[in-house]
Amino acid sequence: MASPAAGVVVIVGSGLIGRSWAMLFASGGFRVKLYDIEQQQVTNALENIRKEMTFLEQSGSLKGSLGAQDQLSLISGCLNIQEAVEGALHIQECVPENLELKKKIFAQLDQIIDDQVVLSSSTSCLLPSQLFAGLAHVQQCLVAHPVNPPYYVPLVELVPHPETAPATVDRTHALMRKIGQSPVRVLKEMDGFVLNRLQYAVISEAWRLVEEGIVSPSDLDLVMSDGLGMRYAFIGPLETMHLNAEGMLSYCDRYSEGMKHVLKTFGPIPEFSGATVEKVNQAMCLKVPADPEHLAARRRWRDECLQRLAKLKRQMPSQ
Ligand code: NAI
């Protein structure tokens, strides 16, 4: 665990993702300054983090080696960006997904940061070349894209701008490891990065199968939650190929023709509208009515499942 003296991390934007980052960095022993333009947002965020950490400690799921009280004492709110960034080792931007707003904030930060700090964006889909174009400190900039909810899903995609210094990616990779996250290096920027490209490929085919009446929406979801998803929590699609035959070469030898035959039958990009959206919506609402209470309850259940899965993954001996 890092000592608090190891450095200060600044979170810009104290919404859903900013709060999660704050908790993760505090769990690693870092001092966290939570900056927002709205005083009320900061107050709400600190209160929400306090409740969340107390609950996590009681349920035995608090990350890091410090207790909740000690972790909480590492996080403070801040409304002055200049003060916030002074001496910081890492700045994690978490403002709403709006290119112009993010560019404005990075231009502002570019004026006040030193040559040491890493400037990182949580963006889900904006490209580094759009976000960091023309910044004097572009070598210190990258995207570090978390997955919701970041406290239980550790993956972070690190995506550099073409001019990002390799040391910036290395430092961020090490920092993410230090706070218990699982960073991956996306070597070149690409729309959707990696996670969302895989996710959209799955969503697309799921949609086409329901649209063509091959399977019902609820059975489609079961194929993932009780089928593919069971092993994907532990091994990825490439290792699955390797293990499902006598190694990768044997898998390709045996199954590549079959795979190509099926892949040629995939259809065009779905419209996600019309009769199919009605059908899917009806099936989803039957399971989880789309009102705030039911959705929140189901999300709590999902987070508890993820929390237990994360615990299981930590307990499994690595090979
Ligand atoms: P949010 O809307 O919950 O929070 C945004 C926060 O930014 C608010 O507290 C707002 O007051 C603050 N803000 C607005 N303008 C500001 C400014 N000029 N300076 C400082 N703070 C400002 O948004 P959320 O969901 O936390 O998303 C943040 C980023 O994380 C987005 O880029 C999003 O794409 C990305 N992301 C979101 C995920 C999700 O599932 N919500 C998952 C992964 C990434």
Image: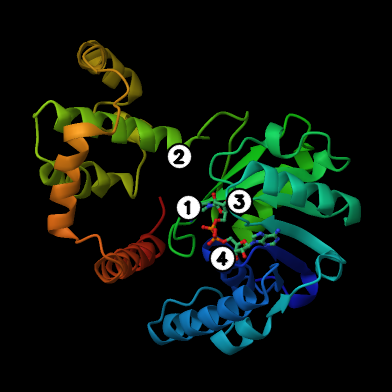
Spatial CA distance of label 3 from label 2 is 14 Å
The numbered dot on residue 195 is 2
> Label 4, on which residue?
15
CB under 8 Å between discs 4 and 2: no
| Of the image marks 4 and 1, the number of the one nearer the N terminus | 4
Q: Residue at x 27, y 68 (%)?
A: 301
Lower sequence index among marks 4 and 3: 4
Q: What's the CA distance linking mark 4 and mark 3?
A: 12 Å
* Ligand 1 position by quadrant: bottom right
Q: Secondary structure at mark 3?
A: loop
Residue type at mark 4: give it. Gly
Q: Horizontal placement of 59 versus 25: left or right? A: left
Choose mark 4 or mark 1, whichever is in front: 4
Q: Which element carries disc 2, helix, strand or loop?
A: helix
Residue at (11% x, 43% y) in the render: 219
Q: Which residue is mark 1?
A: 147
The yes-or-no answer for disc 4 within 8 Å of ligand 1 is: yes
Q: Residues within 10 Å of mark 3 (few under 14, many from 20)?
A: many
**Visible in this render: residue 103?**
yes
How is the rendered protein coloured?
A: rainbow
Q: Amino acid at mark 2?
A: Leu
